[in-house]
Amino acid sequence: MTDTDVTRVDEPRGDDTPEWEVFLREDPGEPLRHVGSVSAPTASVAHEQASALFGRTATCLWLCPAAAVERFTRRDLGAGAGVDARTVPEAPGDDPGGAGA
Amino acid sequence: MISISKLLCSLDAAGDGLRYDDGRDSTREQITEERTTKPVVVWNLTRRCNLYCEHCYAGADLDAAPGELTTAAGRQLLDELADYGVPVVLFSGGEPLVRDDLETLVAHAADVGIRPVLSTNGTLVTPERAAALRDAGLKYAGVSVDGLPERNDAFRGEEGAFDAAVRGIENFLDAGLKTGLRYTITERNAADMEGVVDLLSEVGVDRFCFYHLDYGGRGGDIADADLTPEARRAAVERLCDLTRSYHDAGEDIETLLVGNYCDAAFLVEYARDRFGEERAAAVRRYLEVNGGDPTGERVADVDYQGNVHLTQFWQGYSLGNVRDRPFGAIWDDESNPLLRALRTREEHLTGRCATCRHRDICRGGSRLRGLAAGGDPFAPDPQCYLTREERGADAGGSTAD
């Protein structure tokens, strides 16, 4: 990715309950891969939830607060659709209230 | 969705092609002529709602939440869903009518070839908005009512909510829109089912969808108000009897069961008991085509922030976000072991489900309830009410446990 074709995704993945990105490795020889996210109030609860979902196959599970992840993509959803006529509701503060907030 | 009226009363409906691959000879216009492998997508447009219902799976709130997809992002999402082959988008919430661009998005869905349908509490439906939604191309509106007036208003947290919902239903019907009831059955309101059907059929509603409580969002907080297996079986049996009595009287109401595919097995047993083996076999064939619980396969959810979920009820886990990559890329990514396993779930079901002879038409029921009750997405659904005999001689577990 180069700076010119990359969009930073600033919108949150969660709301009142923190969101945790989940990474796993099924085989010790393979790289970690992202398998989605869980909503949980703490890291230990997030680990419990991720283990329930993926424990049968994962040899390694990593969790990261979604709010701590800087997301960049070549995609810019809605950017090509013209001016947005709708008024987006005010968020309750600058911090979206996601993980770690 | 399992149609009681289709399976027990042979009622043609718009969903026959989509649900049973049986639309070619139907007298009704079909959503799709043939069963599609692409999911119906529930899009929770917003988390905001003007009510605060006890059982809300989306955890909707009176206040705005950050990160709603904008109109432009929504248009692109709909474009991508159409390109992927999604047949239906159910606009939901929160309460979708709190967004003033709902009509714009409904119109865009219709323009790109997706059937737009709506789930609403009905209380914000004025004659003007009903007409605008009709003009935008809306095909169906489902209005949530969860009991007779007193019970519904207590459930929904606002006095007068029942009357406001009925006014909304009347406004939809006056605008010429097909309109149905959405009713979540719990211990608290099961006694009201017949009364609500009688009352709303007088208003002109002819489609009634009965949802079993799923344990997502605030629905998980009131799991203790869920029906016992025996009471659930009795409630489903009453709905079958009610549907047949309406049809016998010449009133072709459509009744559907949602959210517990144990009902599929029960309908086979009900047909066998009331009509004999031949009819039971025919009902079973339809349900084999239908394919059982649709989690992660025939139903998907995109929440107001663009997170993709396995069903609308399973908001606590997200596969990914449409701001990062298109819906189709997320939905097709079977490098995700949970998604992959859900699509071959008969191999992974545990306990009494593993040997149940109805597992091909039920597929274990709700995987979210199995997870909530057993800590494993392949654990038995606690709402199963089949007897040991109905599950088959080899099936383990106690009767109706």
Image (spheres, rainbow, N blue to C red):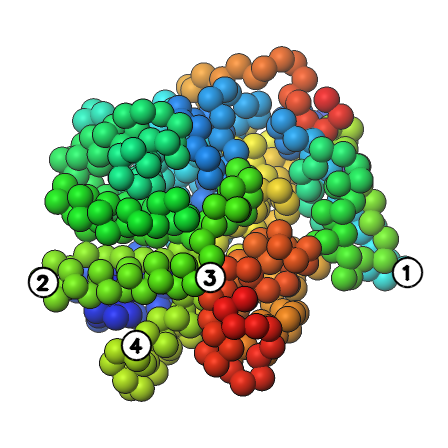
Dot 4 or dot 2: first in sequence order is 2
B343 sits to left or right of B36: right
Q: Chain of mark 3?
A: B
Dot 4 or dot 3: first in sequence order is 3
Q: Chain of mark 2?
A: B
Looking at this view, is B73 or A93 the one in front? Answer: A93
Looking at this view, is B112 or B376 the one in front? Answer: B376
Looking at this view, is B228 or B299 the one in front? Answer: B228
Q: Which residue is mark 3?
A: B229
Q: Percent x, y for residue A51?
A: 76, 52
CB atoms of marks 2 and 3 within 8 Å: no
CB atoms of marks 4 and 3 within 8 Å: no
The amino acid beneath tag 2 is: Ala
Spatial CA distance of label 2 from label 3 is: 30 Å
Spatial CA distance of label 4 from label 1 is: 53 Å
Q: Percent x, y for residue A15?
A: 62, 28
Q: Which residue is mark 4?
A: B271
The amino acid beneath tag 3 is: Pro
- For mark 4, give the secondary structure: helix
Q: Which residue is mark 1?
A: A29
CB atoms of marks 4 and 1 within 8 Å: no
Q: Chain of mark 4?
A: B
Question: Which label lies toward us, 4 or 1?
Answer: 4
Respond whether the residues carrying marks 3 and 1 are from the same subunit.
no
Q: Which mark is residue B249?
A: 2
